[in-house]
Amino acid sequence: MSQQIEVQINIGGRTFDVACQEGEEQYLLTAARMLDTEASVLVDQIGRMPEARMLLMSGLMLADKTAGLEDRLREAEDKLGEMAEELREFRERPLPEPEKVEVPVIPASVSDTLAELAARAEAVAEEIEAKAAG
């Protein structure tokens, strides 16, 4: 069973002793730093003010930021949901029919002519080799 411990935090130039469960100190210190950042802005702009008012205003400023982030998160989640739906639709869509591709056939007369030309070229090459050898 965890025990409570006292942690000292600074907010707006003031020190507070706060109790938390053992192991939660880092979360408390992080939250206190966030609140101190807002309180420091107030103290810089307005100057010294009652503790309760400083904490209230700082808390409201953090709440405003949090609300803005929650709105952005909700928008991002909505967009993600739309994209997931679109992806599902693409995956479920039937594949398109394969296209027929027609390859032109070389007429037999052209093939015959090419074969005849190749035979003549070989004959000429043999004649040249024979003359060169002989």
Image (tube, helix red, strand yellow):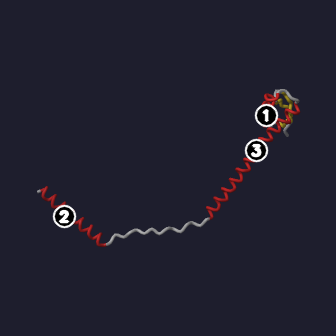
Q: Which of disc 2 and disc 3 is earlier in sequence?
A: 3
* Res 10 seen here: no
Question: Measured along the vertical axis of the image, is residue 117 above or below residue 11?
Answer: below
> Callout 1 environment at 10 Å: few (<14), some (14 to 19), or many (20+)?
many
Q: Nearer the viewer, residue 64 or 10?
A: 64
Which image quarter: residue 129? bottom left
- Contact check, label 3 and label 2, Cβ < 8 Å: no
Q: Which residue is mark 3?
A: 68
Question: Measured along the vertical axis of the image, is residue 38 above or below residue 86?
Answer: above
Q: Which quadrant holds the N terminus?
A: top right
The answer to whether residue 122 is left or right of residue 99 is left
Dot 2 amino acid type: Ala
Q: Which of disc 3 and disc 1 is earlier in sequence?
A: 1
Q: Which of disc 1 and disc 2 is earlier in sequence?
A: 1
Q: Secondary structure at mark 3?
A: helix
Which image quarter: residue 39? top right
Q: Percent x, y for residue 68? A: 76, 44
Q: Residue at x 64, y 62 (%)?
A: 89
Q: Secondary structure at mark 2?
A: helix
Q: Residue at x 34, y 69 (%)?
A: 106
Q: Which residue is mark 1?
A: 38
Q: Which residue is mark 2?
A: 123
